[in-house]
Image (cartoon, rainbow, N blue to C red):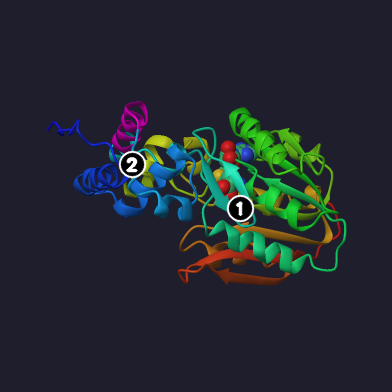
């Protein structure tokens, strides 16, 4: 079905109404907020400036750019990709197709790690599957004495993480490394850290069809899916932990719905104080433990 565009629209409030209605028709959630955010990002306006400027005239070029953005959102392109930026914890990051869009639940992982590292002035931290760099950068900003390695298999994600680290002024604290955490010789070549944090891929291939088009069609497959075994990253990291975590070090994972107790169970032999923290939706989301086994395997 073709959607009619009224070519006489030329003030902000009319265009906004058009955007909201177009998104509602496409069954996009939060259509009003999305229509506004797209307009604000195009005009470069804060919310306050925007509210005062509802009667402002929009030039034809901006109008057609706005309509194109709304159409892309209606075709389920993620809002964060269209705006180009996302707020995460205490930072703002560039968001595009190169890496997973940072999620609010991952802020719980950052918050938990920062709480548990309190008192350590210069910890060395490995972020496995760093993606956009969100976790490493948020920790670096909060703990100026920390040193981090952001590890990822994806060169595109590492490029984005490099941009984001520089944009947030922590490029000197974070070293970005390309590597495969499932590859034992590579893991053995790493040093041991004071803390390991990871939000690895944890969606089984079988669950592909329950994901929204925004996720499946626009976010990197390598960031989402863990093959046939959704727990493979957790298992591999826990099995090889002696190579990468110092005794007494902190391991902190973000896990998928229903995975927390399974991951906690696999940690119980070699870790003490294994704990689970919930996200804001009450879902068991973060598993932590202190590595208690000093001998190399
Ligand atoms: C769920 S995303 C998390 C991204 C980011 N840390 C976040 O919290 O938004 C998982 C990340 O793991 C990376 N990854 C996938 N397989 C990997 C592997 N075998 N070794 C290292 N990183 C991997 C992906 O490229 C992706 O950036």
Image side of residue 257 versus residue 73, left or right: right
Residue 193 place in picture, x, y as percent: 82, 51
Q: Quadrant of the N terminus?
A: top left
Residue 245 x, y percent position in the rendering: 80, 53
Question: Which residue is depicted at the point 80% across and 65% down?
Answer: 292
Dot 1: what SS? Answer: helix
Q: Residue at x 37, y 38 (%)?
A: 77
- Where does residue 282 sit, x and y in percent of width and height? 47, 72
Residue at numbered disc 2: 213
Q: Which residues are magenta?
A: 59-71
Left or right of 175? Residue 23 is left
Depth check, mark 1 against mark 2: the one in front is 2
Relative to 194, residue 163 above or below: above
**Residue 86 visible:** yes
Q: Residue at x 37, y 36 (%)?
A: 217
Ligand 1 quadrant? top right
Q: Secondary structure at mark 2?
A: helix
Residue 137 position (above or below residue 98):
below
Q: Nearer the viewer, residue 234 or 67?
A: 67
Q: Which mark is residue 234?
A: 1
Return the residue nearer the eye: 69 or 140: 69
Q: Is residue 63 magenta?
A: yes
Q: Is mark 2 within 8 Å of ligand 1?
A: no
Of marks 1 and 2, which one's residue comes earlier in the chain?
2
Q: CA distance from mark 1 to mark 2?
A: 26 Å
């Amino acid at each position: 079905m073709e959607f009619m565009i009224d070519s006489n629209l030329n003030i902000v409030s009319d265009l906004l109404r058009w955007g909201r209605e177009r998104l509602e028709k496409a069954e996009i959630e939060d259509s009003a907020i999305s229509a506004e955010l797209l307009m604000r990002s195009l005009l470069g306006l804060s919310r306050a400036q925007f509210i005062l400027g509802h009667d402002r005239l929009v030039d034809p070029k901006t109008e057609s750019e706005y309509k194109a953005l709304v159409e892309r959102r209606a075709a389920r392109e993620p809002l964060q990709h269209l705006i180009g930026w996302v707020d995460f914890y205490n930072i703002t990051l560039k968001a595009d197709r190169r890496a997973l869009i940072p999620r609010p639940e991952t802020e719980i992982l950052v918050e938990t790690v920062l709480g548990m590292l309190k008192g350590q002035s210069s910890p060395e931290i490995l972020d496995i599957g760093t993606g956009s760099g969100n976790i490493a950068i948020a920790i670096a900003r909060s703990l100026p004495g920390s040193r981090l390695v952001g590890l990822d298999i994806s060169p595109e994600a590492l490029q984005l993480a490099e941009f984001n680290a520089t944009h947030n002024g922590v490029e000197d604290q974070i070293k970005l490394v390309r590597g495969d955490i499932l590859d034992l010789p590579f893991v053995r070549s790493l040093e041991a850290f004071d803390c390991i944090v990871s939000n690895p891929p944890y969606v089984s291939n079988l669950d592909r069809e329950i994901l929204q088009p925004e996720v499946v069609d626009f976010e990197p497959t390598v960031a989402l899916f863990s093959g046939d075994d959704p727990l493979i990253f957790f298992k591999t990291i826990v099995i090889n932990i002696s190579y990468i975590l110092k005794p007494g070090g902190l391991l902190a994972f973000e896990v998928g719905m229903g995975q927390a107790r399974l991951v906690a169970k696999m940690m119980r032999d070699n870790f003490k104080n294994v704990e689970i923290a919930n996200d804001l939706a009450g879902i068991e989301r973060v598993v932590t433990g202190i590595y208690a086994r000093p001998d190399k395997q």
